[in-house]
Image (tube, helix red, strand yellow):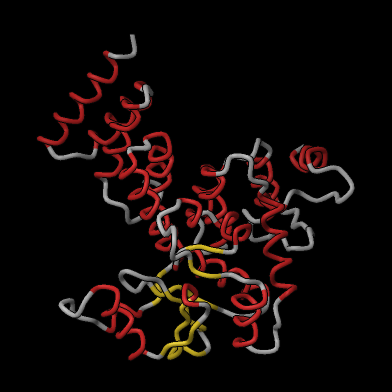
Amino acid sequence: MAAENAAMVFSGPSAAPPRWAMGIGPSWSRNGQADTSESVVAEIDCLMVAWDPAEKFRQLLEREEFALHEGALCIAAHGCPDMDFDAELDRLDALAERCDRSTREQMLLSLFGDLGFHGNRTDYYDPRNSFLNEVMRRRTGIPISLAVLTIAVGYRMGYEFEGIGLPGHFLIRDRNEPDTYIDAFAGGALLDAQGCEELFHQITGRQKGFHPAFLAPVDDSSILERMLGNLRAIYAQRQDYANLEWVLELRTMCPSVPAGEARQLGLINMERGRFEEAARRFEALAQAAEDDDEEQLLQLATRARARMN
C-alpha cells in the first residue's frame, strides 16, 4: 500500500519524486531511480506532505551526511517564502555547467570571473547575503555564503571542498590539496597557511593571537549554525522579531547551539503572541534544567499561559 501511495503522489511526466524529496534519503539517485526497500518506502511516506523547510532542515541535521547546499536553501526558504527549491537546485546545476572544469583554478576563474560572483563589500549586513538563492541571483554574498556556493558548484564538478571556519572570515580548501586555502570572498584567491594568518590579523587586529586550529575543517552542521548566527545578529540588531523567531527555531535544531537560545526563542514567541508555543517550550526546558533555572522557566511558562486568555 505504501508503494502504491508513493506512485500516486509522485505520478506525472517524470514518475519520480521532486528533487527536494530525493535529497532526503540516500537511496535516491540524482536521475530519479528509486530503491523500493521498505525503509525507503516508509521514508517516502513521511515526505507526502507540503514542502516544509523547517522540517526538511531538521531531517537533514539528523543524518550523518547531507548536502550542505540543501541546508542552506532551507534557511533561504524562510527568508524568501516563495523560493522554489527544485529551481534553485537546477540553478546550481546550470552554474556548474557554465564553469570550466579542466582545473580547480579554471573553475574558480569561471565562477568569480566569467560569472561575476564577488564579495559584497558595500552592504555586508544585508540578510540576502546569507540566502543561497539570493547569492546566486545577485552574484554577491559574504564569505560563508560564497564558500557554500563554491562547495556546491565544486561538488557537481568532482571537487571535494570543505569549509574552514577562520574566525572573522570563512575559507574553503580542496581535500586533495589541504595546504592550499581558497578565499571565495576575495574572488577565489588562493592562500597558504601564512597567507591565512596574515588575513586573520588584517581582520581581527594584531592584538589577537593566531592558532593553527583556526584552519581546521568544520562540519556542515556547524557551517549552517554559523550562517544562522550571522542572521541572528542582523535581525537582533534590527529588532526584527518575526525573522529572528525562525532563525532561532532553526538554530535550536543544531546540535551544538547553547540551550539558552531555546529560552530566548520562547521569549520571542511571547513577543510575537505565540503564548502556547512559548509555554510548551519553557516547560520542556524546565524538565532538563537545574533547580533555580527550572523555577524561572516554569514561571515563564505560567506567564505565557496566563496571556492565552
At a point 32% along the width and 52% down the height, the residue shown is 257
Q: Looking at this rendering, what residue extends furthest in the top direction?
A: 309
User: In which quadrant will I find the N terminus?
Assistant: top right
At a point 29% along the width and 17% down the height, the residue shown is 305
At a point 52% along the width and 77% down the height, the residue shown is 187
Provide residue 248's location: percent of width, then percent of height. 37, 43
Q: Is residue 32 left or right of residue 82?
A: right
Give the vertical position of 294 relative to 208 (above or below): above
User: In which quadrant will I find the C terminus?
Assistant: top left
Q: Quarter of the image holding residue 93?
A: bottom right
At a point 74% along the width and 63% down the height, the residue shown is 30
Q: Is residue 21 left or right of residue 291?
A: right
Give the vertical position of 251 relative to 215 (above or below): above
Q: Quarter of the image holding residue 139?
A: bottom right
Q: Quarter of the image holding residue 112?
A: bottom right
Q: Looking at this rendering, what residue extends furthest in the left direction?
A: 292
Provide residue 221's location: percent of width, then percent of height. 44, 60
Give the vertical position of 192 relative to 118 (above or below): below
Q: 250 or 6: nearer the eye?
A: 250
Provide residue 223's location: percent of width, then percent of height. 43, 63
Q: Is residue 242 left or right of residue 38?
A: left
Provide residue 68's location: percent of width, then percent of height. 53, 62
Give the vertical position of 275 relative to 258 (above or below): above
Q: 196 or 278: nearer the eye?
A: 196
Q: 237 or 192: nearer the eye?
A: 237
